[in-house]
Every structure is written in C-alpha cells, then in structure tokens.
C-alpha cells in the first residue's frame, strides 16, 4: 500500500519517525479523506470504477488476478488465479475445483448483465469439500483488491462545524463559516472544530448524492463508448434512509442550495475487511434477522447536532446485512437455520431490500451460502422450496476425484514446520490415493455405447483413479480401445452429475485424511512422518464403521466401496514407487536405454513391414531386419504367436500418432507406455538377486553406519550402497531414517522369499 522512503532521509528503517512518515504518506497517497468535489472529479476521470455495484466489483476482482489454463486428462480447464492467493504467498489456497470457480464466475457475470444481484449462490457438497476455503479465498481477494488504486471504495460522512465557527445561532441560515477557503468544504476540518460527525454505516455509494435524473444523464454520457453495463443500484438507487433525511433537511435549511449541502459531505475511503465486518461478513446459523435499527437522535453524544437535524428521528442500522453492504455476505451452513429464520432472504435477495422497524433498507451486496447435501435434500422436500428455488443458484462442490490434486492439499498442510519432523516421500500420496478410492462410484455401462460400455464396466477403482488423475488406461487394451477410453474421460467423469448420489458426494473427507496424517506424525515407531504410520492409522479408521458414513456403504462388484481392501491396494502402489526409486537410484540402467531398445525394435519392424533392408551402423552394409532381436523383444512383451499382427499394429499406432502430432518427434513414453514398462520390469526381474542384495546391503549400512559397513562389504557393493543412498536423498527426498524404513518394508513384503 505504501512506498518506501528514500534511503537518504536520515531516519533508521525501524524508527517510529520513519514509520510515522510512511503512514502519513500512505494516507495522503491513498486519498483516505476528500471533499465531494474531489470525489466527483475522480468519478469523471474513471466512471466505470466508481459506478460499480457489488457484483461488478467482484467480477473485476476475478478478472484482476487473471486465469491460467490447467491441463488435465479431461482437457483444458480454466483456473482463476485469485484462488491461488498470490497476494498472500499462496497461504490457504484452494486446490482444484476449477469447475466450481467457473460456475460462480458465470453467476456473478450474469448479475452484471442483468444489472442487479437477484440470487443467492449456494455452494452445496459433502462436509469438508472446501466450501469455506472457496469463500475465504474470494473474501481475501476482495480485501486485498480494496487496498489498490483500482479497487478504491468510498463512503459518506456528514460533518457539522463547531459553533465557534458560526456567526449566529445553531440554525443553518445563520452559518457564517464557508469552510476551506479554496474549496468551501468542511471535509478537512480538524476534530476540535467539529461539533458532530455522522457516519453512514450502510456506506452508500457517494454517486447517490447526485439527483437520480441528472445522474442517469451523466452516466449515459460518460459510459456510452465503454463496455460497461450500468447497474440498477447506481442508475435508479437512492440514498439510505438516514442519509436521505440529512440531505433533505440540509437542502431545506439552505433553501435549495445543493452546493452548500455538499460542503457537509466528507468522502472517506474504506477497505473491505471480514475481521472488522466492513463489507465482508460471515453469518453463522442463528435465529435473528440480520439487520437492526437504533434511534440515533436519542444519543446524548449527538446533542450538538444543528437544530434542523434534531427535529428528525434519525436511526443508525446494524447487523450482518448492514455490515456487508457494498461487499459480500456469506451464510455459512445456511440450511441449518430453521426456515422462519431466513424467509426474509426471499425479498432481500430478489429486491435487494430488507425491512426493519422504521424503514426499508436497500442493500448492494453479493449473497453466497453453503450447505451440506443432507440439509439440502431435506430443504428440497418442503413446500416452500419452490419459492426459494428461483432465488438460489445451486453450485455443487464435490470432493476431489483426482488424487494428484488431492495430494497437493496434504503436501501444503502436512509439512516439517507443521508437524515438527521430516515428512517421508509418498506420505501425502498414500493418503490422497486412499481418499479418492473411497469416493469412486461404480460406473453404469448402460450409459455408454456398446464398445465403450464394455470398457467402462471393467474399470476397477484404482484404474478409474489413474484414468482421472493421469489419463492412463488399464493394461491389456488394444490401441483402439485405449484411444476410445481416453477420449471419453470427461463423459465418465460427469456420468453421475445428475444423480443425487453423485461421484464425490461420499468418501473420506480431506479433513479426516489430514487428521489421519497428523495422527501418523505422532507414531513413535517412526522417526519421520511415514506412509507406514499412515497405513496403521487407516487400519484403525476403517474399524469405526458407525462413525463414518462412507464406511457404511455396501461393497459392490468390481471392488467399489471396499475401503479396507483399498489400504492393501494403496500399499502395493506405494511399494511399486519405492521399488522404482531404488532401481533408479542404484543406477543399474538409465531410463533412456528402454526407449532406445524400443526405438531400435520399431526401426527394424518398420523395414520388415516394407520388406526393406537397413544399413548396419557397425559394418556399413545393408542387412535384413534383425529377426532375433525383434523376436526377443516380442517375447519380453508377451506378444505370443500373432507376432506379424503385432508388428503391423505397432506401425499403425505410430502412423496414427504422427497424424495427430504433425512435425513432432516420436515420444515412445506416450505411444508405448505399457511396452516400456514391460521392458523395464523384465530387465529388473532378471536382476532381482542383485536388487535384493543391494537392498540388504543398504539396510545394513543404514543400521550400522558407514564405517562398519565399509569393513564388511566389498568395494563395489559399498560404492553402490553409497550411490543409491545419495540418489534417494537428492532425487526423491528421503532421509536416512525414512529410507531405512522404506527399504526394510520393501524387503519384507517383496523379497522375503
């Protein structure tokens, strides 16, 4: 908000004098207080900024931070950067939920197009699906934006000068002080020269002081060449009740002199703040209408008001709807309230007004609420739901179904700073994958065309999770089947969108998994926060069938809802990762060699299909394709007797990929991922004894230390152990303690025989 002072000002950086100077400079630069003339000049210079209603302001906040395209197996999604909280270093950001972001932005954009806010956006989903985080990111973005020049917001204060400055009595007809000599305003009077100051708790837009007919003419003129939709609030709105009373009383006292009335107006900048309930309010479930009034002219502290105002019955207004005006109001767990407690929202949302004891308040604010699915289901059954339906924009917010995204939640929350100890690799991964598996819903094959239906029917929960997160098809499919399945990921993802029990409605919540991970951090058996401790916690959690709703679901064919079995499946995936990392860390073979071997095979197959010879790089002669090499590779890949068909299929797949990726170099990992994995597995199967021996040596090294192991191991084994451990630490983030745990676990589970 404030610029630094020049380095040669002679003041230490931490001195109060320097801090005071910076605050004064910021106060002046940010135009914290000004006269109405100055505000009106700002409006004429940037009419679209100062003629915004709350929906336009919120849309501009979304647009201010911009968007980024997120590549997913389902295609490109648009992510709004405000949910990454760049203004606060990403703290407590929202992970995923790009579809929800798009729906809320679309709803807000519709409010802008319609000229008014006429619906409450209701985020609904299971407990723990980040509804509160979603709203929190929006509110924090609003707070930050309001500190910027382009986000400046202003309110009205009424200033009444001291009797010392008046030539006669207290009536306005005898006021002799003309205010500031240059501007005639009372806005800059010192506090000791002010008898009374009335603050507008509704924070009316100062433009409402311009008579409505004239205001509309000015807006039409200033905005005619700009792509700006004028809101009803600015075009047809009027001052709040108290402001209107004061304005009219002053106008009468000054015999219609409009400019003299404006002398009493002080324009003050305000900043949105949920902490101080300034244009950003969260309403918890309660039984009161969210607006109240209190008679102001009975307050003795305001006895110094001019007589022209003392005859008025002035009221000040309070409550959540008042505090949130010009900003946003969140109704947390809205449907936990009894119906009678929020019936008033029908009129408030539809007409932007709410009745209090002595008047009707007109408000300009965005309404957003949250509810879990069980309360929403009950709400839909009551007769009054039809009345509410037209004033509610339902936005579904399910659990995440992408374990890669889910993992980011725990990576950011379960850190060494948070738990006080090292977090072993894959700790967040095992929690995320297990959580997503508990949320998977068995597909309904009848929803798909015949060929695709057969593929979808065979998807296991793990295969479905891999399809959603990494776009990886199950093993054993033909190229055509793989292509068909990958082309329909989005359709599979959205299959249950219209169902009450949609995918992502049930399962382990991120809150429960985070608690599980934090409990694992306290497991005294492990020096680090270990996946092994997480597995122990999972085993305990699934015993609580009566506590967690998702554990009550009956298992279905295909392995769905088998939450205890999912622990075993995740454990196997974890062991796969550890084994792969150990293989890579041992440096037995570079990954490139698998691709080189497959590339050599493809080259020979290509010449074989064309019945062409190819040049031998060693001898320079033209030779026939190497039948022995091709046969050996095909044997490893388990091709079987139909090798000719397989070879033609390889060439067809390359041709199809080349058509879809013109001009690009062939990427074997994309075209032949399963074949590369098979070559890798075959290679390591042949070297299993070497792998086991190295792992045993590594475990002894970690248990005994370097010096004893050096005396016991031969030189080659010792060097391999040190290389392996160094790579585990530098490449994958292991420490010696969690490396020992992982290697010991792998040896017990896969190399015990």
Image (tube, rainbow, N blue to C red):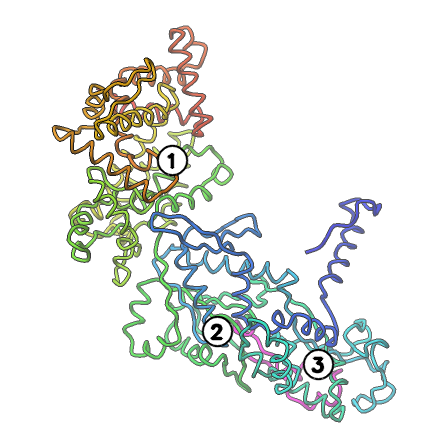
Disc 1: which residue? 665
**Image coords of residue 308 (percent x, y):** 73, 90
**Image coords of residue 424 (percent x, y):** 41, 32
Q: CA distance from mark 1 to mark 3?
A: 83 Å
Closer to the eye: label 2 or 3: 2
Q: Which residues are magenta?
A: 293-322
Total labels: the figure holds: 3
For this rendering, which residue is in front, 609 or 158? Answer: 609
Looking at marks 2 and 1 on the same chain, the residue that comes earlier in the sequence is marked by: 2
- Please state, as top left, top right, bottom left or bottom right, where the C terminus lies in the image: top left
- The verdict on residue 301 being magenta is yes
Closer to the eye: label 2 or 1: 1
Label 1, residues with CA under 10 Å away: few <14, some 14-19, many ≥20? few
Q: CA distance from mark 2 to mark 1?
A: 47 Å
Label 2, residues with CA under 10 Å away: few <14, some 14-19, many ≥20? some
Label 3, residues with CA under 10 Å away: few <14, some 14-19, many ≥20? few
Disc 2: which residue? 113
Q: Are marks 2 and 3 in contact (CB under 8 Å)?
A: no
Looking at marks 2 and 3 on the same chain, the residue that comes earlier in the sequence is marked by: 2
Circle 1 SS class: loop
Give the residue at x 51% y 60%: 138
Give the residue at x 78% y 78%: 195
């Amino acid at each position: 908000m404030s610029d630094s002072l020049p380095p040669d000002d002679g003041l230490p950086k931490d001195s109060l004098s320097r801090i005071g100077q910076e605050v004064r400079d910021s106060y002046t630069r940010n135009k914290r207080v000004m006269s109405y003339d100055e505000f009106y000049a700002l409006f004429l210079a940037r009419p679209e900024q100062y003629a915004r209603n709350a929906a336009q302001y919120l849309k501009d906040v979304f647009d201010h931070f911009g968007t980024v395209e997120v590549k997913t197996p389902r295609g490109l999604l648009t992510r709004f950067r405000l949910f990454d909280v760049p203004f606060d270093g990403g703290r407590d950001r929202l992970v995923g939920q790009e579809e929800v972001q798009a729906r809320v932005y679309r709803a807000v954009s519709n409010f802008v197009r319609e000229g008014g806010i006429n619906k409450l956006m209701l985020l609904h989903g299971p407990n723990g699906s980040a509804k509160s985080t979603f709203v929190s990111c929006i509110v924090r973005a609003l707070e930050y934006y309001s500190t910027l020049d382009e986000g400046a917001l202003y309110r009205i204060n009424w200033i009444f000068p001291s009797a010392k400055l008046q030539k006669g009595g207290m009536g306005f007809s005898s006021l002799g002080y003309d205010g500031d000599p240059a501007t005639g305003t009372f806005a800059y009077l010192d506090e000791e020269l002010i008898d009374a100051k009335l603050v507008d708790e509704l924070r009316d837009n100062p433009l409402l002081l311009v008579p409505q007919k004239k205001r509309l003419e000015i807006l039409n003129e200033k905005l005619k060449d700009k792509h700006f939709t004028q809101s009803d609030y600015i075009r047809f709105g009027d001052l709040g009740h108290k402001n209107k009373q004061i304005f009219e009383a002053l106008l009468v006292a000054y015999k219609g002199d409009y400019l003299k009335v404006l002398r009493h107006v002080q324009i003050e900048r305000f900043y949105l703040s949920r902490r101080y309930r300034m244009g950003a309010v969260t309403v918890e479930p309660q039984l009161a209408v969210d607006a109240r009034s209190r008679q102001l002219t009975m307050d003795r502290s305001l006895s110094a008001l001019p007589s022209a105002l003392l005859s008025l019955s002035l009221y000040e207004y309070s409550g959540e709807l008042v505090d949130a005006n010009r900003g946003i109001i969140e109704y947390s767990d809205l449907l936990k309230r009894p119906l009678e407690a929020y019936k008033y929202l029908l009129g408030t949302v539809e007409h932007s007004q709410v009745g209090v004891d002595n008047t009707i308040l007109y408000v300009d604010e965005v309404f957003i609420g949250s509810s879990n699915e069980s309360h929403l289901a009950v709400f839909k059954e009551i007769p009054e739901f039809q009345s509410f339906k037209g004033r509610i924009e339902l936005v579904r917010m399910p659990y995440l179904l992408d374990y890669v995204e889910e993992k980011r939640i725990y990576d950011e929350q379960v850190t060494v700073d948070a738990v006080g100890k090292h977090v072993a690799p894959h700790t967040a991964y095992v929690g995320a994958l297990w959580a997503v598996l508990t949320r998977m819903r068995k597909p309904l094959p009848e929803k798909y065309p015949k060929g695709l239906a057969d593929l979808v029917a065979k998807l296991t929960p793990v295969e479905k999770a891999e399809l959603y997160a990494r776009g990886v098809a199950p093993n054993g499919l033909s190229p055509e089947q793989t292509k068909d399945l990958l082309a329909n990921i989005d359709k599979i993802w959205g299959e249950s969108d219209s169902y009450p029990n949609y995918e992502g409605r049930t399962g382990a919540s991120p809150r429960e998994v985070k608690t599980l991970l934090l409990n694992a951090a306290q497991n005294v058996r492990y020096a680090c926060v270990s996946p092994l401790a997480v597995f122990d916690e999972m085993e305990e959690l699934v015993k609580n069938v009566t506590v967690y709703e998702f554990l009550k679901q009956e298992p279905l064919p295909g392995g769905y809802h088998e939450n205890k079995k999912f622990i075993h499946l995740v454990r196997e995936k974890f062991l796969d990762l550890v084994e792969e990392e150990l293989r890579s860390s041992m440096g037995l073979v570079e990954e490139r060699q698998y691709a080189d071997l497959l590339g050599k095979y493809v080259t020979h197959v290509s010449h074989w299909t064309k019945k062409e010879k190819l040049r031998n790089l060693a001898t320079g002669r033209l030779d026939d394709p190497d039948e022995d090499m091709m046969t050996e590779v095909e044997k490893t890949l388990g091709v079987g007797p139909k090798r000719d068909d397989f070879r033609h299929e390889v060439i067809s797949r390359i041709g199809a990929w080349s058509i879809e990726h013109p001009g690009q170099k062939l990427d074997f990992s994309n075209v032949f991922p399963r074949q590369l994995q098979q070559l890798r597995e075959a290679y390591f199967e042949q070297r299993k004894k070497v792998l086991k021996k190295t792992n045993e040596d590594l475990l002894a090294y970690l248990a005994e230390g370097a010096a004893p192991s050096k005396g016991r191991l031969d030189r080659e084994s010792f060097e391999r152990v040190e290389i392996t451990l160094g790579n585990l630490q530098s490449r994958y983030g292991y420490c010696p303690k969690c490396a020992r745990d992982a290697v010991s676990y792998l040896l017990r589970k896969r190399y015990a025989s």
